[in-house]
Amino acid sequence: MNQTELLLAFYGDDFTGSTDAMESLSSSGYRTVLFLEPPSQRMLEKFDGLQCIGVAGTSRAKTPEDMEAELRPVFERFAEIGATVTHYKTCSTFDSSPQVGSIGKAVEVAREYFTDQKVIPLLVGAPPLGRYTLFGNHFARMHNAVYRLDRHPVMSKHPVTPMNEADLRVHLSGQSAERVGLMSILDLEGPIEKVREYFQNKMSEPGMLLFDVLDVDRLGVSGQLIWEKAKEHNLFIVGSSGVGYALATHWKKAGIQNTAQNINPSELRSGKPVLAVSGSASPVTQKQIVSAIENGFQGIRVTPQQILEEETMPAELIEKAIQFINEGKSVIFYTAMGPDDSSIKDTRELFAKKGMSEFQSGELIGRQLGRWSKEIIRATGLTRAIVAGGDTSGFVTRELGVYGLEVLRQVSPGAPLCQTFSEDEEMNGFELALKGGQLGGPNYFSDVRDAK
């Protein structure tokens, strides 16, 4: 492919958030491949009709110093590729802080590579995921209720980056000195000529510009404004997968042709049985694990002592999983059963004694689950697996030797079933579903297992 053909290139600040962004684009028919590292031109040329690319990262869990080290090579490569829009993809709940996952720091680094733009648009709402922004305040749906972010049952109590401020402009002021303007819901009403005039005036003041998001129609208007500005000169933007939904809505109306081919259901491999691994402690994942066990999965708890056995593999645990799978039973490994599981405290204390930070312990958990998964997949010939947990998904995927992913089937918003790309023939074309802690319906694991 020619580098200039790319409509959009995005970096996801965590792994499952990256698959969410990929899904928002591919579900609209725009062929999108998610890479684990910035792709070379040779790698891009492997994919016909490629219109959007992503790089899955881990900046949401990093300090500003570590973020800078990770982001510089990505932004440098994206600046070389020259996609019409370059997107720093954040979580749709915008969880971040000055110390961890600072979105302000990401903007600061990006300014050095995208130097010809005074204003960086900021769009966080994503109605398909139940995320809304009104007069600068952000809201998120959980189950059948919508909560202001600082009153959300999960995000207001996030263990690392609790969201105690719903106004995203105020929240960002703790991470960046940049001014944050607002394209309010009222500014997005009325004839497009009038809306465009508001937008042009607000784009004349340096800083960032936050878009309100309430529904798909006005999301499409935001996409039109952003795309028109990007056609004047390539544009860097910050936001959730709502950015992809906004642009794709406009692309369709503008007749920008998509190239992705729908995968025929018959091309999916048989998913039964499957292996699932979870490093998530969220209450959503807890309910999903309970449901999976009720629906025929064999649940196997993983202890912190087993995780710490880096030199060897827990033979008994792996042999048990292999036996179940060979009997036609799906297996789920889990490190915790919800946020109140006593094993969480035990794990933290044990890892702290080893001198490991929170991020290091999360990485070790993910890498170990990945090593074990690869062993089990090779021993059983499995063709499908599931990973729960944002950071866990990234580390497991790397251990499996995967360099890229593409959506095969939508299962639950933000948590699709993907096919893998790998230099390892055994893992090339493998089917892998990845979900963040807050994503997926109550029967997510069995839904993926049963997908045809």
Image (cartoon, rainbow, N blue to C red):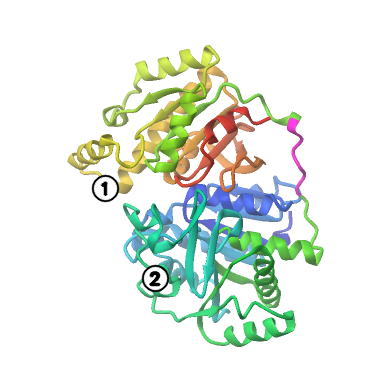
Residue 309 point in image, percent of width and height? 29, 27
Magenta span covers which residues? 260-265
Q: Assess whether residue 234 is covered by the magenta stretch.
A: no
Tell me, yes or no, if residue 124 can be seen here. no
Residue drawn at point x = 39 percent, y = 23 percent:
300
Q: Would you say residue 31 is visible in this rendering?
A: yes
What secondary structure do most residues of the magenta stretch adopt?
Answer: loop
Circle 1: element type: loop
Pick whichever, 379 or 245, lies toward us.
Answer: 245
**Residue 122 at x, y percent in the picture:** 54, 70
Q: How many C-alpha atoms fall within 10 Å of the one at disc 2: few (<14), some, or many (≥20)?
A: many
Q: Position of residue 159 (x, y in %)?
A: 31, 52
- The residue tagged 2 is 171
Which image quadrant is residue 246 in?
Answer: bottom right
Instruction: Say which residue label 1 marks.
Output: 357
Instruction: Name the element at disc 2.
Output: helix
- Which of label 2 and label 1 is nearer to you? 2
Is 71 located above or below residue 441 in the figure? below
Write the residue at 62% across / 28% down.
450
Q: Quadrant of residue 336?
A: top left
Identified by mark 1, the residue type is Ser
